[in-house]
Image: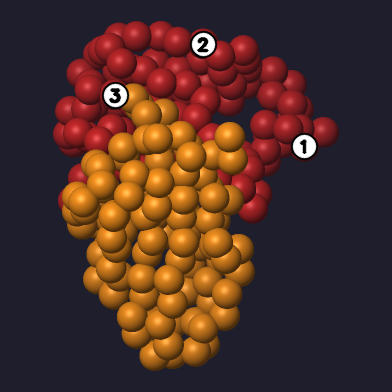
């Protein structure tokens, strides 16, 4: 099993550009999450999903969109990148109470 | 939104020392989790707590679920250099995982 796979690992975006952060898991977990982590801070929940076709906002959803058309995939979309979205993004999936995290995507918006 | 207050924010200790950190909330939670994040990696689960008053160990790590269900504690005994990292308390609220701010641990050999 690959676990939770995030791509890309690094990306530099210009202000106003758009991109999709990919996340896929091969563990058949229903719950999936997107977090962002700013330097020296904890993880803040952007969006989460309890199953295919269902998504919900977390603490900091503004500027992001998600979709969950399959159990495996949970992409995160930035439509108009802003410098405030410079961060490390983590995707996770969960079974019971244990969440498995991807290795992160380091995004810089300049 | 819900907030977990984790302390201390950082600790600098000597190898072999014991470490304690804690997490409090104004809300009641039914599950408390402790995660560790190594540099450049995603967090990894250390210990899960499911019952008020529960004390659970994982090697040199011991965690407790507070009796009020509003707090949790993590102790690391006889620290070693590979204990370096950021430790997060996490509360599970109906499937939403809420993270504390983290305790950054540095261990001097």
Mark toward the viewer: 3 or 1? 3
CA separation, marks 3 and 1? 33 Å
The label number, if any, that marks residue B108 in the structure image: 1
Q: Quadrant of the C terminus of chain B?
A: top right
x%, y% of residue B10?
55, 44
| Neighbour tally class for label 3: few under 14, some 14-19, many 20 plus, Cα within 10 Å | many
Q: CA distance from mark 1 to mark 2?
A: 24 Å
Observer-nearest of B28 and B6: B28
- Mark 3 sits on what residue? B31
Looking at the image, residue B59 lies above or below residue B27: above
Instruction: Tell me which numbered mark, 2 or 3, is placed earlier along the sequence.
Output: 3
Q: Is residue A13 above or below residue B5?
A: below
Q: Chain of mark 1?
A: B
Q: Name the residue at 54% across, 35% down.
A: B44
Residue wearing tag 2? B57
Please, what secondary structure does the residue beneath circle 3 have? loop
Task: Tell which chain the image draws in orange.
Answer: A
The image quadrant that residue B106 belongs to is top right
Q: Is residue B10 visible?
A: no
Pick the front one: A53 or B7:
A53
Mark 3 falls within which chain? B
Which of the two marks, 1 or 2, is nearer to us in this view? 2
In the image, residue B97 above or below residue A77: above
Tint applied to chain B in the drawing: red
């Amino acid at each position: 099993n690959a676990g939770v796979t995030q791509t890309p690992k690094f990306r530099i975006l210009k202000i106003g550009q758009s991109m999709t952060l990919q996340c896929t898991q091969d563990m058949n977990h229903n719950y999936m999450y997107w977090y962002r982590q700013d330097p020296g801070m904890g993880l803040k929940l952007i969006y989460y999903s309890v199953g295919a076709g269902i998504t919900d906002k977390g603490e900091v959803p503004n500027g992001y969109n998600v979709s969950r058309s399959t159990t495996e995939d949970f992409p995160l979309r930035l439509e108009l990148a802003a410098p405030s979205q410079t961060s490390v993004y983590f995707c996770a999936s969960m079974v019971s109470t244990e969440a498995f995290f991807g290795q992160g995507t380091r995004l810089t918006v300049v | 939104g819900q907030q977990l207050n984790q302390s201390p924010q950082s600790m600098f200790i000597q190898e072999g020392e014991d470490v304690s950190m804690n997490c409090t909330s104004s809300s009641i939670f039914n599950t408390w989790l402790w995660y560790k994040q190594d540099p450049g990696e995603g967090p990894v689960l250390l210990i899960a707590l499911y019952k008020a008053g529960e004390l659970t160990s994982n090697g040199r790590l011991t965690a407790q679920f507070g009796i009020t269900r509003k707090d949790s504690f993590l102790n690391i005994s006889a620290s070693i250099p590979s204990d370096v990292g950021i430790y997060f308390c996490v509360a599970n609220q109906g499937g939403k995982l809420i993270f504390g701010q983290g305790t950054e641990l540095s261990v001097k050999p």
